[in-house]
Amino acid sequence: MSWFIRKDKGIQTPTEMKREAPDGLWYQCPNCKKVMHTREHKLNAYTCVHCNYHEKIGSDAYFAVLFDNNTFTELDPDMISGDPLTFRDTKAYTDRIKTTIAKTGLKDAVRTGYGKMNDLDITIACMDFGFIGGSMGSVVGEKIARAIDHSLKHKQPFLMISRSGGARMMEAGFSLMQMAKTSAKLALLAQAKVPYVSLLTDPTTGGVTASFAMLGDFNIAEPEALIGFAGPRVIRETIGKDLPKGFQSAEFVLDHGFLDFIVDRKDLKDKLTSLLKMLQ
């Protein structure tokens, strides 16, 4: 016989006495499905404490992780895309931009800023996938180019954090030209011997991979990030063959010589600091 017997059936707590957990208090990992406190997840640099899954995050979170006390000066915060081709798909491009700005609070798919990282001066450009898939348009290219100019002027290292689906189709040739523009700016950075570190996160694909994302003095990535030009499905359908296991994962790309190392986000700030101190 059990030591506890419920005398009355059902829950007897009055509705007004019930307590519900507020929204956002808990985080469930999409990989291992385990639950942790949201604050614990944030303190762990937005990685799962159980399986180390790296949650996809944007510029706000990366700046908080990297800049000392989340203190930085943002560059060109109000730059917004135009509509050079008067493009329309299911809706006008200008309407799509306005809707996305209202939804995300972002002006475009990259934010740039400068500040201190473990007391080292650094300029950082970080892409936001939430803004039209992190696509690269004229504003993305221009803001990255201006951030590189800032690094050149002040002789401080430049960090590019990429997360993108590639060039923005709504700007066609204008977006493709950003590949050449950013690459030319990075050549100036190399000539001045100012360090450039490229961090590839999940996913980094298309024209971004084919330009500035792979031009770092050091190309590094987060664990299990998808890195490639065309997507696995497109490649599979093109060549008519199954792809190797783990194809286009950061670990696969590292094994084939296209990355220098993979870094856990929790260690990112300290690893970058050590690397940049060696380059001084």
Image (cartoon, rainbow, N blue to C red):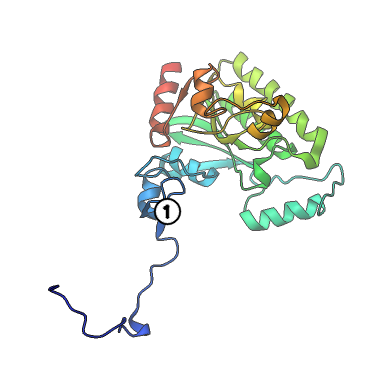
Kindly give the residue lying farthest to the front in the view shown.
1
Q: Which residue is drawn at 40% across and 61% down?
A: 25
The residue lying toward the viewer, choosing from 149 and 131, is 131
Crowding at dot 1, Cα within 10 Å, few <14 / some 14-19 / many 20+, comes out as some
Specify whether 227 is left or right of 137: left
Would residue 280 be visible to someone looking at this image? no
Q: Name the residue under label 1.
A: 28
Q: In this view, does 102 lie above or below 187?
A: below
Q: Looking at the image, how many numbered discs can be counted on the residues?
A: 1
In the rendering, at what x and y percent does residue 263 appear? 43, 29
Name the side, left or right, on which 17 lies relative to 227. left
Point 80% across, 34% down: residue: 174
Q: Visible in this render: residue 254?
A: yes
**Residue 117 at x, y percent in the picture:** 43, 34
With respect to residue 133, does 267 lie above or below?
Answer: above
Q: In which quarter of the image is residue 119?
A: top left
Q: In which quarter of the image is the N terminus?
A: bottom left
Secondary structure state at the residue bearing disc 1:
strand
Q: Could you say which quadrant of the image residue 48 lies in?
A: top left
- Foreground pick, 119 / 270: 270
- In percent of width and height, residue 237 lies at 71, 31
Between 100 and 8, the one nearer to me in the picture: 8
Left or right: 20, with 174 as reference point: left
Image quadrant occupied by the C terminus: top left
Q: Residue furthest toward the right? A: 86
Q: Residue 187: horizontal and vertical position, in percent? A: 65, 18
Identity of the amino acid at label 1?
A: Gln
Q: Is residue 277 left or right of residue 173?
A: left
